[in-house]
Amino acid sequence: MSFQAYLDNIEAKTGKTPSDFIALAKAKGFGADTKAGEIVTWLKEDFDLGRGHAMALVQVIKNGAQISDKHVNSGGTHSDPSNTLRLSGKKTTAVKPAKKATKKPARK
């Protein structure tokens, strides 16, 4: 599962975007210097998140949207298309492109 997929699954489960979690963590006094275990415990107790999903949020709470290039387009299980994560939430409604008008052949 890609890093972004972890974040999207967390949003589906909790209704909160990664940006929401960053704001909640900041309000609790959590930041770059907070030990991961403290954040994981909070996420487990308040949101029933498992360790893997909690650690994905630890990454964005402590480091923001930037991730290592290690898995970008690696083709592996954890491959992401970009080294920048989408923290504002997954798109819930896709805008479909308008259909192109096609010319009908002229009648003879």
Image (cartoon, helix red, strand yellow):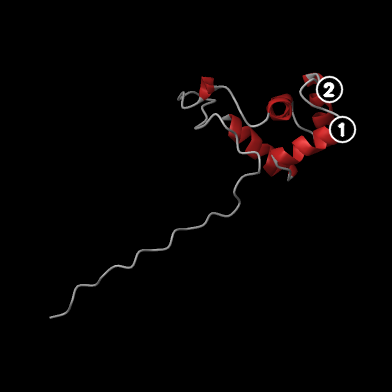
Residue at numbered disc 1: 28
Query: Going by the image, does 86 lie left or right of 19?
Result: left
Find residue 71 and report its horizontal and vertical position in percent: 52, 23
Q: How many marks?
A: 2
Outermost residue, bottom side: 108
Q: Position of residue 41 (x, y in %)?
A: 83, 25
Above/below status of 79 relative to 27: above
Indicate the amino acid at tag 2.
Glu
105 left or right of 55 in image:
left
- Name the element at disc 1: loop
The image quadrant where one finds the C terminus is bottom left
Determine crowd level at label 1: few under 14, some 14-19, many 20+ residues with C-alpha closer than 10 A: few
Considering the image in quadrants, where does the N terminus appear? top right
Which mark is on residue 51? Answer: none
Query: Residue at 68% of width from left, 43% of height from top?
Result: 12
**In which image quadrant can residue 65 be found?**
top right
Label 2 sits on residue: 38
Establish if 56 lies above or below 13: above
Quadrant of residue 62 in the image? top right
- Label 1 and label 2: CA atoms lie apart by 11 Å
- The residue at the point 80 percent across, 26 percent down is 39
Q: Position of residue 80 (x, y in %)?
A: 52, 30
Q: Residue at x 87, y 32 (%)?
A: 28
Judging from the image, what secondary structure is the residue with disc 2 in?
A: helix
Neighbour class for label 2 at 10 Å: few (<14), some, many (≥20)?
few
Amino acid type, callout 1: Lys
